[in-house]
């Protein structure tokens, strides 16, 4: 028995454990700094947030011990049951949960609150790892891809129903995990293009974006064909049809915007040019036309989705982020105060417990979503750099360990852990400095909250446990 314990201790990746403990301690100290007041000076005051966080840290250590006492095969064998139980919790919280800040995401029993959405991350990671890591799995088969996406997006649907958009967005990071397992890079490229088009459709006039898309499309088509004749014919057909439609609209008093004239012109000219290309054996035209048409339609859909699907506070946050609106005393207040707090810290910070922005509650949610402000104000550029470096090292270490795994299950789960942690720390820090919209997600291991700390601890240490059994085929 003693020899088994010694073997486990020798196999544990202590570098990852040390990074975890360092981040947890940094979080605890800065929670103390964020909510410090002179009437509760003791850092062991369990009536305060920092005291409660300490209790949750010790409870997290107990969870770690439990994780290490369970055999690694358990996590693969019970991956689907754990996933199903979590989905049921997400369903029941809609019926019996408590609403906090507009989101019905919490079970509340007395003073104890639990957020199932946080635990759904490791449950989904286990389920995806088991399915994608199964024998003869091929991500390029459409049925396999659809089944995998179903596993990922079932919890997303329930979380969106809870009105917790921030937690739901985390699951899109699984695309990177699937990319590692053979998903076409075109998916990532299309996703990146969609984001760019979404932003352009909001900050520019629709007709400007449409013209820009068509200009880029014609250039790409010319580069792929390397025949000036083809591009001249294609552009001439489009120009002629656009001119005809514009004349019909103008002299026929038809109520049709110029943007729709461009879209209809492209559709008609594309059909005509496809017949021309078919007769003259011009290749690479069908997919090119479809991608361009999809881009044009997507731009039209952005405004509708933005104004009719997103909530008002979500639209306001995006508008503030993109500079469309400037409301430092309204929807932009959090980010504005956050940047003031971080900027005031300078190079070395104001010193421990010396922050004025956080001490006088100028920054909302300063112990949870905006805990990075406290670090920036009191520890300055040096402190924030240390936190960033620790997170980057942790993610790199997890990817390194994931690549060393001998089983598909362990490798895929390891990449899921790395991807989720990366998304959280990148977006959380990004939203505190105005580079990402405020979507209300915690900074892993640092933000105040038991559900957050426990879920990230379970997520991480299941992988550390799997890594200790790297030589086993689980």
Image (spheres, rainbow, N blue to C red):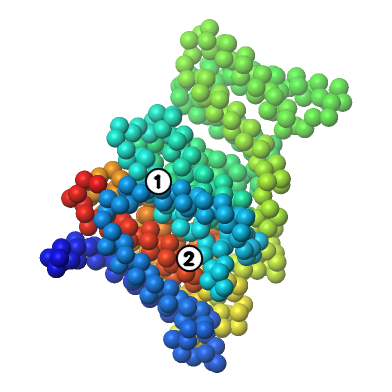
Question: Which residue does the numbered mark 1 point to in the structure image?
Answer: 80
Does residue 346 appear left or right of residue 439 in this picture? left
For this rendering, which residue is in front, 40 or 426?
A: 40
Which numbered marker is on residue 142? none
| Residue lying at the far bottom of the rendered structure | 39
203 shown above or below 286: below
Q: Residues within 10 Å of mark 1 (few under 14, many from 20)?
A: some
Q: CA distance from mark 2 to mark 1?
A: 21 Å
Let me know if residue 49 appears in the view: yes
The kind of secondary structure element at disc 1 is helix
Looking at the image, which residue is at 49% across and 72% down?
A: 448
Looking at the image, which residue is at 28% across and 59% down?
A: 70
Q: Residues within 10 Å of mark 2 (few under 14, many from 20)?
A: some
| Numbered-mark total | 2
Which numbered marker is on residue 451? 2
The image quadrant that residue 131 belongs to is top left
389 shown above or below 33: above
2 and 1 marks in contact (CB < 8 Å):
no
The kind of secondary structure element at disc 2 is helix
138 shown above or below 71: above
Where does the image place residue 117, in percent across and percent down from the top left? 51, 56
Q: Earlier in the sequence, mark 2 or mark 1?
A: 1
Q: Nearer the viewer, mark 2 or mark 1?
A: 1
Where does the image place residue 311, in percent across and percent down from the top left? 68, 53
Looking at the image, which residue is at 39% across and 30% down?
A: 140
């Amino acid at each position: 028995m003693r020899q088994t314990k010694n073997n486990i201790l020798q196999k544990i990746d202590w570098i990852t454990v040390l990074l975890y403990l360092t981040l947890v301690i940094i979080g605890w100290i800065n929670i103390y700094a964020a909510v410090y007041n002179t009437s509760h000076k003791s850092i062991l005051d369990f009536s305060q947030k920092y005291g409660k966080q300490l209790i949750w840290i010790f409870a997290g250590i107990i969870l770690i011990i439990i994780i290490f006492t369970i055999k690694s095969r358990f996590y693969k064998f019970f991956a689907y049951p754990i996933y199903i139980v979590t989905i049921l919790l997400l369903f029941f919280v809609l019926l019996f949960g408590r609403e906090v800040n507009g989101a019905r995401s919490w079970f509340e029993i007395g003073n104890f609150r639990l957020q199932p959405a946080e635990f759904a991350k490791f449950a989904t990671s286990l389920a995806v790892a088991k399915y994608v890591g199964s024998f003869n799995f091929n991500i390029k088969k459409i049925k396999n891809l659809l089944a995998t996406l179903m596993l990922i997006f079932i919890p997303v649907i329930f979380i969106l129903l809870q009105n917790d958009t921030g937690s739901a967005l985390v699951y899109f990071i699984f695309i990177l995990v699937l990319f590692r397992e053979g998903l076409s890079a075109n998916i990532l490229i299309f996703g990146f293009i969609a984001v760019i088009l979404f932003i352009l459709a909001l900050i520019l006039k629709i007709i400007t974006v449409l013209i820009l898309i068509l200009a880029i499309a014609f250039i790409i088509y010319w580069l792929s064909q390397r025949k000036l004749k083809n591009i001249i014919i294609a552009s001439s057909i489009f120009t002629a049809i656009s001119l005809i439609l514009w004349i019909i609209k103008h002299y026929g008093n038809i109520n049709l915007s110029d943007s729709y004239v461009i879209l209809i012109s492209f559709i008609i000219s594309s059909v005509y040019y496809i017949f021309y290309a078919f007769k003259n054996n011009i290749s690479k035209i069908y997919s090119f036309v479809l991608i361009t048409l999809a881009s044009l339609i997507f731009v039209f859909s952005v405004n509708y989705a933005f104004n009719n699907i997103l909530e008002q506070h979500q639209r306001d946050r995006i508008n503030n982020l993109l500079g469309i609106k400037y409301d430092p005393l309204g929807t932009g207040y959090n980010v504005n105060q956050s940047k003031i707090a971080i900027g005031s810290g300078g190079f070395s910070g104001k010193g421990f417990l010396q922050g004025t922005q956080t001490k006088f509650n100028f920054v909302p949610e300063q112990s949870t979503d905006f805990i990075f402000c406290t670090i920036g104000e009191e520890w300055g550029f040096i402190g924030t750099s240390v936190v960033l470096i620790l997170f980057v090292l942790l993610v790199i270490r997890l990817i390194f360990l994931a690549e060393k795994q001998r089983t598909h299950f362990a490798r895929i789960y390891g990449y899921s852990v790395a991807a989720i942690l990366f998304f959280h720390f990148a977006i959380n820090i990004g939203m505190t400095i105005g580079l990402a919209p405020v979507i209300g997600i915690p900074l892993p291991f640092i933000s105040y909250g038991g559900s957050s700390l426990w879920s990230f601890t379970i997520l991480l240490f299941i992988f550390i446990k799997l890594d200790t059994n790297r030589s086993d085929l689980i």
